[in-house]
Image (cartoon, helix red, strand yellow):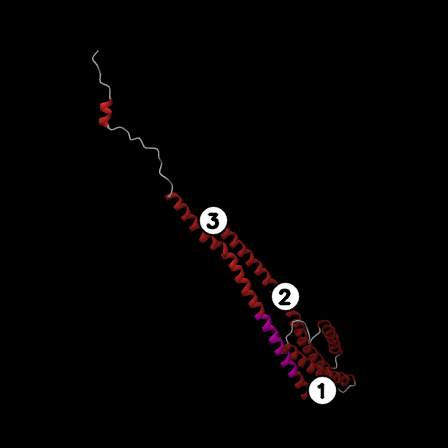
Amino acid sequence: MKPSKLVAPLLLGLLGFTVLSVILALILGQERRDALLDLHPGDRELNHLIRGRDLLASSVRGYAVTGDPHYLDAFQREMEAARSRERAAGLPAAPGLAADETALIEAAKRNADVLAALESLALAATQAGDRERAVALVYGEPYLAAEKSFTEAAAKAKDKVDRRLDERVDELDRKADLAMKAAVAAPLLSLSFLVPAWLGFYRRKARRRPADPTPQRQPPSRRARYRLRPSRRPA
């Protein structure tokens, strides 16, 4: 097939490849957003769970030691906020969480329930005036052991969620970047192929051009001009 006849199919093929590469990059970008939306709620609520538990522990301990009602107000506000978040997010079965992540969150929540039970006893003891018992409850071995178990399980769950999210986003970023590079490279490849093809075609066309059939008239030589000059006759 002549190069001139290959130009149109090649251009159409490369144009189609470019369009498909751009579409693929857009699809991968949407998958990236979906991955973030899928895992972000679970990660966000897990952060709320960890921070909320720290606030509850510091509030109940402050109330047990000082009897200051401001600590009690802070504890009660955080407890209500935690219940609202849990109802809205559905932890531990939040969307996007894997089975092992959910199991770790369930373990953390079991320890959080143990802490909440001890905190209720400490609050009641403080309100009854028995702050010594309240302090023993929130600084005793059962409370410290449950607090440690909660922290470890929650930290492991967060580490797994963050790592999985980062790996998924990095994978989609690499694929989208590759698709965009392919979309940019396709026109360059087309030029690198088509320009030499066009040049070769026109060179062959120039070599095949027929010679001019009209004979070239040579100018007469000096001797011929002398012979052709008319002789002068005497008057």
Cα–Cα gap, marks 2 and 1:
45 Å
Task: Tell me if I can see residue 228 in this picture.
Answer: yes
Relative to 64, is 21 on the left or the right? left
* Residue in front for this viewpoint, 197 or 209: 209
Of the residues shown, which amino acid type is indicated by label 3? Lys
Residue at the extreme right of the image, as rendered: 128
Q: Residues within 10 Å of mark 2 (few under 14, many from 20)?
A: few
Q: Which mark is residue 137?
A: 1
Dot 1 amino acid type: Leu
> In 3D space, how far apart are the residues under numbered discs 1 and 3 (Cα atoms)?
88 Å
Provide the secondary structure element on which disc 2 rests.
helix
Q: Residue, x 67% and y 88% (percent of image)?
A: 141
Question: Which region is colored magenta?
Answer: 148-167
Give the residue at x 23% y 26%: 224
- Labelled disc at residue 5: 3
Tag 2 residue: 34
| Three-letter amino acid code at the position of disc 2 | Asp
The mark nearer the N terminus, 2 or 3, is 3
The crowd level at tag 1 (other Cα within 10 Å; few <14, some 14-19, many 20+) is many
The correct choice, above or below, for 168 with respect to 106 in the image is above
Q: Helix, strand, or loop for circle 3? A: helix
Q: Position of residue 117 (x, y in %)?
A: 74, 84
* Mark closer to the chain start, 2 or 1: 2
Residue 161 among magenta residues: yes
